[in-house]
Image (cartoon, grey):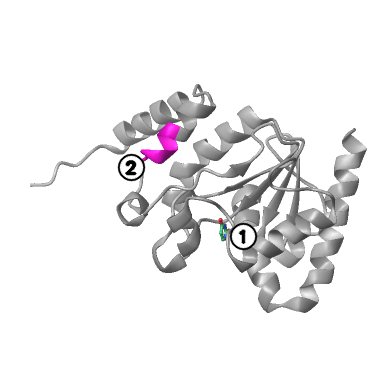
Amino acid sequence: MATVVPAAATSVQTTARTQTIQQLDWPALQQQVATCRACKLCESRKNTVFGVGNPQADWLIVGEAPGSEEDKRAEPFVGPAGKLLDNMLGSIGLTRQENVFIANVLKCRPPQNRDPDPYEVAQCEPFLLRQIELIQPKIIVALGRFAAQSLTKSDARIGSLRGRVHQYHGLPLIITYHPAYLLRNLPDKARAWEDLCLARRTFGGLL
Ligand code: URA
């Protein structure tokens, strides 16, 4: 007969895990992510995708989850969407090597690129929060509906979330379209440009 774990015990385990993650330094956090087995995505992933960029960056860019290429190469935003993201960052004077860190809500690829499920997001969230505590960015930019809804804890459409400054754990959060979406919807590039300008103005106002 299957052992039933009481809900209270599961939540105690979850709290203990979160508390452990909250105390990790950068290399230990990388190691925890690389060996994480907290949800079933660990069974189908090739690699975890911790993130890329400057771990002391002022800008944190947050996408949804690794896709197939990212899963193979253990790096976020590679391929055409990554190229567009680099161009978008370049348009406001940023590069992934120097002044941004790029991470995802999920560190593992959901099979067939399906939407992440709430349990997966909850298990991965402590990793993103610890990344934020260690990087200490000044501003966060969320890319696409899924990241936007996860960070704002809302189910509003991206069209209604973008265009204003939100807060995420005390940091200004700007929402824009996902570069993969922009590749298919060129007219929205103008709106994404407005979002980047809002981000740049918001960042400028913090200095
Ligand atoms: N889409 C994302 O949201 N993140 C990636 O890393 C790649 C594609």
Query: Is 134 situated above or below 39?
Result: above
Looking at this rendering, what residue extends furthest in the left direction? Answer: 1
The picture places residue 111, in percent across and down from the top left corner, at 39, 64
Residue receiving disc 1: 155
Q: Label 2 sits on what residue type?
A: Arg
Residue 37 in view: yes
Q: How many marks?
A: 2
Residue corresponding to mark 2: 37
Q: Nearer the viewer, residue 144 or 6?
A: 144
- The answer to which image quadrant residue 136 occupies is top right
134 part of magenta stretch: no
Q: CA distance from mark 2 to mark 1?
A: 27 Å
Identify the mark nearer the N-term, 2 or 1: 2
**Residue 105 location, x and y as percent?**
55, 49
Q: Residue 173's x, y, as percent?
A: 74, 46
Asked if residue 36 lies in the magenta stretch, the reply is yes
Closer to us: 49 or 72:
72
Label 1 packing within 10 angstroms: few (<14), some (14-19), many (20+): few
